[in-house]
Amino acid sequence: MAQQAVRLAAVGDLHVKKTSQGTLAPLFASVNDRADVLLLCGDLTDYGLPEETQILVKELVSTVRVPIVAVLGNHDFESGHQGDVCRMLTDAGVKVLDGEAVEIAGIGFAGVKGFPGGFGRGTLGAWGEPGVKQFVQYAIDEAMKLESALARLRTAQRVALLHYSPIRDTVEGEPHEIFPYLGTSRLEEPLNRYPVNVVFHGHAHHGALEGRTAKGTPVFNVAMPLLLQKFPDRPPFRVFEIPTASGAAQRRPDDAPEPARVLENG
């Protein structure tokens, strides 16, 4: 019988350090029992070092038995070894997305790191000094990569994976002064043009658990520090269910996907 639904375990901001050996195995082991796919929303390492990545890879390979999809975060870029981080994860079988799309178990995944820039009327515009224009252009480029990945998906059920937030709602709880550094509405624009079932991101360690885009798509902040704070008695990841065979067979790729259903908070 065809699988009726796919369970997704989502978490970000693992911040693996050189001293993290053995600390993530219990988390990853519990994922195997609860989900069909593991989603990692950036800041997988603390300083973006190959040594940190090696520890993460060892934990993943020795423990996780389900497919893994990931995006990098700003911490993974810190030391200038983001290419090595990506290569090492890819060699270990992790699907690292940077403007790409992948299909697993009938679900389409599109992913990109994203970038800061502010939300709504506070979104930084490309005006004035060259440095400002370069900053804004980077944000635009990330949004365009996300749009390109979303446009390539041909599945009825679709998921977007980010590190930075595409909406203001899920950064509420952080100091207002740093809102512009936690994401940008430019990332929301592709999501409104190419609807998905659900969006996952990290980065906002003290933000809100969930919000919605202007068109009603659910957005979940799955930063591990936030999940540890909100659900201290549970493993720090959230589990969601997306239907596949049941109902999805009658849906076209251009139909608006139905929202993912929250199964548990760990």
Image (cartoon, helix red, strand yellow):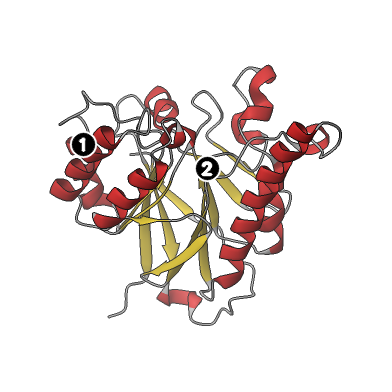
Residue 257 in sight here: no
- How far from the left and from the top, in percent, is residue 16? 30, 31
Q: In the image, what residue occupies the spot 52% across and 42% down?
A: 220
User: How far is disc 1 from disc 2 in space, using C-alphas?
Assistant: 27 Å
- Quadrant for residue 17, please give it: top left
- 226 relative to 89 in the view: left or right: right
- How far from the left and from the top, in percent, is residue 248? 49, 75
Q: How many marks?
A: 2
- SS at badge 2: strand
Residue 48 in sight here: yes
Asked whether 42 or 90 is in front, the reply is 90
Tell me, for residue 1, which label it has, or none.
none
Q: Would you place residue 106 above or below residue 88 in this image?
A: below
Contact check, label 1 and label 2, Cβ < 8 Å: no
Q: In the image, what residue occupies the spot 54% across and 50% down?
A: 199
Depth-wise, is mark 1 or mark 2 nearer the camera?
A: 1
Q: Would you place residue 178 above or below residue 212 in this image?
A: above
Q: Would you place residue 59 above or below residue 240 in this image?
A: above
Q: In the image, what residue occupies the spot 71% across and 43% down?
A: 185
Residue type highlighted by circle 1: Ile
- 203 relative to 193 in the view: left or right: left
- Quadrant for residue 19, please give it: top left
Asked whether 129 or 163 is in front, the reply is 129
- Of the 4 image quadrants, the one containing the N terminus is bottom left
Tell me, for residue 55, which label it has, or none.
1
- How far from the left and from the top, in percent, is residue 55? 21, 36
- SS at badge 1: helix
- Of the 4 image quadrants, the one containing the C terminus is top left
Q: Residue furthest front?
A: 130
Residue type highlighted by circle 2: Phe
Judging by the rendered image, the residue that carries numbered circle 2 is 220
